[in-house]
Image (cartoon, grey):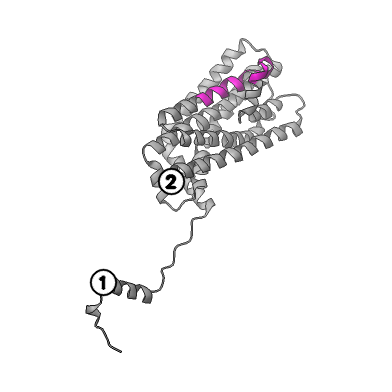
């Protein structure tokens, strides 16, 4: 048996021998969903706080202006409840659907998805964190709009606490839809257009009373995720709300939110690998 000096061995043989003798490096633990979601949420909240607050005022004033205009047409009753509920949820649609579609469309166009792809963050955390941050901006405007509408149309304020369920559920459904539109659009201009069309649909189908709509438009209204949040809020303005129906509308809104966020997560995976 002959002994070969180390200098005579090729470099790749030495590297293979050192690798065999060296213990395998242990990989760090994979990032968990909840801590990653909280980190993305905080980052998005601090990043968009200055830029989105003026737009939130625009969304609030837009909804209040619509109610003032409708006050000359609608006196009260079920139509007034529909106008107030639709205007309040419209604030959520403006931020969670329109602005989020623009954000993800621009993120995909300028290569921002590559930054998130290099981080040990689950795709669901990116989508949920951004959606939650954008939906959080809608809380003050939605509350102000609902209170102003109740005072304007003489509706009771006793059950406005239901907004604590309507805002996150409708926000999740609309934010998931907005993120999916932004991630699936091939160009940021198209993402902006789709987001604005979605907000216009929420305006026309959510604010206008459903009794005055044609049957085909009512069917389209039932397909809009925010419709069930509008219906749940509008029912609470009655003298004796049917809470079973309200909970049913909120459950449907929540299920749509889960589906839309799942689609947005799939769209994020699809856009990140391209």
Residue 22 image point, x, y percent: 37, 74
Residue 177 visible in the shown view: yes
In the image, taking residue 89 as reference, residue 10 lies left or right, namely left
The residue that disc 2 covers is 273
In the image, taking residue 170 as reference, residue 184 lies left or right, namely left
Residue 119 image point, x, y percent: 42, 51
Q: CA distance from mark 1 to mark 2?
A: 35 Å
| Residue 212 is a magenta residue | yes
Residue 154 visible in the shown view: no
Q: Is 237 rendered above or below residue 168?
A: above
In the rendered image, the quadrant that contains the N terminus is: bottom left
Tell me, for residue 70, which label it has, or none. Answer: none
Q: Is 39 rendered above or below residue 6?
A: above
From the viewer's side, name the closer residue of 92 and 49.
Answer: 92
Residue at point 67%, 12% (across, down): 75
| SS of the residue under disc 2 | loop
Mark 2 or mark 1, which is nearer the start of the sequence?
1
Residue at point 47%, 37% (across, down): 183
Stretch in magenta: 197-217
The residue that disc 1 covers is 11
In the rendered image, the quadrant that contains the C terminus is: top left
Residue 49 image point, x, y percent: 44, 36
Q: Is 208 rendered above or below residue 260?
A: above
| Residue 271 is a magenta residue | no
């Amino acid at each position: 048996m002959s002994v070969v000096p180390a200098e005579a061995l090729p470099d790749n043989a030495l590297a293979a021998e050192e690798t065999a003798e060296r213990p395998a490096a242990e990989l760090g633990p994979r990032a968990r969903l909840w801590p990653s979601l909280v980190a993305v949420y905080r980052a998005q909240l601090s990043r968009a706080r200055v830029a989105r607050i003026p737009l939130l005022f625009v969304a609030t004033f837009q909804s209040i202006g619509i109610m003032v205009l409708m006050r000359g047409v609608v006196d009260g009753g079920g139509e007034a409840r529909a106008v107030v509920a639709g205007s309040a949820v419209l604030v959520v649609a403006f931020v969670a659907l329109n602005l989020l579609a623009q954000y993800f469309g621009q993120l995909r166009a300028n290569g921002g998805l590559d930054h998130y792809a290099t981080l040990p963050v689950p795709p669901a955390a990116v989508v949920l964190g951004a959606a939650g941050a954008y939906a959080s901006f809608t809380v003050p405007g939605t509350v102000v709009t609902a209170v102003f509408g109740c005072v304007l149309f003489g509706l009771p304020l006793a059950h406005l606490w239901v907004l604590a369920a309507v805002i996150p559920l409708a926000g999740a459904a609309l934010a998931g839809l907005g993120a999916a539109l932004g991630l699936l659009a091939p160009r940021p201009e198209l993402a902006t257009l789709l987001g604005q069309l979605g907000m216009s649909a929420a305006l026309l189908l959510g604010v206008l009373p459903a009794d005055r709509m044609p049957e085909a438009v009512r069917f389209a209204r039932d397909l809009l995720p925010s419709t069930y949040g509008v219906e749940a809020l509008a029912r609470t303005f009655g003298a004796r709300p049917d809470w079973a129906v309200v909970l049913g509308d909120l459950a449907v809104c929540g299920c749509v939110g889960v589906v839309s966020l799942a689609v947005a997560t799939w769209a994020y995976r699809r856009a990140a690998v391209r």
